[in-house]
Image (cartoon, rainbow, N blue to C red):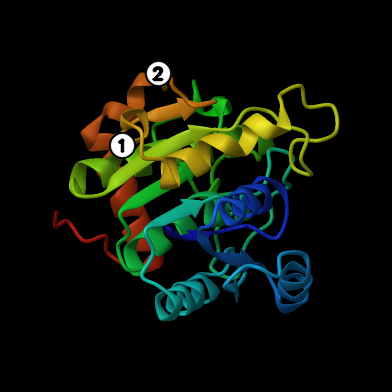
Amino acid sequence: MARVFVTGSADGLGLMAARSLLENGHEVVLHARNPTRAEDTRKRVAAAKAVVVGDLASLAQTRGVAEQANRLGPFDAVIHNAGVGYQEPRVQTEDGLPRVFAVNVLSFYVLTALVHRPKRLVYLSSGMHSGADATLEDVEWATRRWRGAAAYAESKLCDVLLAFAVARRWPSVLSNAVDPGWVPTRMGGPSAPDDLEEGYRTQVWLAVGDDPAALVSGKYFHHLRPKEPDPVVYDVGRQEKLLELCRRFAGVALDAGS
């Protein structure tokens, strides 16, 4: 039995992954954005060990999520599933950042840095990351006209950069990124063409699977198979630039130890 923490698990792919893990005998801690959603989630998934609460758009609440998770851990795996989509308007958080970046990237970084180190980390990305602006020059969108799809794509590129940076820095941890496909969740919309079942299977497999194909690190997967990401994610300098940006925004450093 593995102990797994899944962020953004009140609905969508996170909830489906959590249910799959529970059905296979694993212990799962869920996460919801606010107390109302947490209570609904407890009722829907009574077998879960607990539901931690916090809005990942807020740095203060993200730190609170990490503290709650650490009281319930340690975990064998953490699935960083939380996210907002490509139709997001430019919403500025209380910390002065676009919500897309705050939730899709910075929360993953902060939780990675603060939650006691698991054996495996899984970061949800998207096929939209390929070809996104990789300069990391204006992640705040302070000088550019807002484009939701571009901001989302850049955030998903950052998630692969983060997964690969962690794999490089922490060789004792299996750290991978996943493209779940365009699936008909609330974020993906009802017309999304990919299979919903396939959307969560890879995350679960990477979190608890024991076959050799799952016991790897620094890889990008789609539907249980490794896939080549945008080549820029292998750039160590770019990985380090993202880590430094996140450290500056969050005031939290990622441990460089093995």
Q: Quadrant location of residue 113?
A: bottom left
Residue topped by disc 2: 228
Secondary structure at numbered mark 1: loop
- Residue at 17%, 56% (x, y): give it: 256
- Residue at 56%, 52% (x, y): give it: 21
Q: Position of residue 248 (x, y in %)?
A: 34, 61
Residue topped by disc 1: 215
Q: Position of residue 199 (x, y in %)?
A: 63, 34
Where 135 falls versus 13 (above or below)? Answer: above
- Depth order, front residue of 242/165: 165
- Residue at 46%, 44% (x, y): give it: 123
Q: Is residue 52 left or right of residue 197?
A: left
Residue neighbourhood size for the residue with mark 2, other residues' Cα within 10 Å, grouped as few (<14), some (14–19), many (≥20): few
User: Which quadrant is the N terminus positioned in?
Assistant: bottom left
Q: Is residue 189 left or right of residue 120?
A: right
Where 143 falls versus 28 (above or below)? Answer: above
**Foreground label between 1 and 2:** 1
- Depth order, front residue of 18/144: 18
The kind of residue on which mark 1 rests is Leu
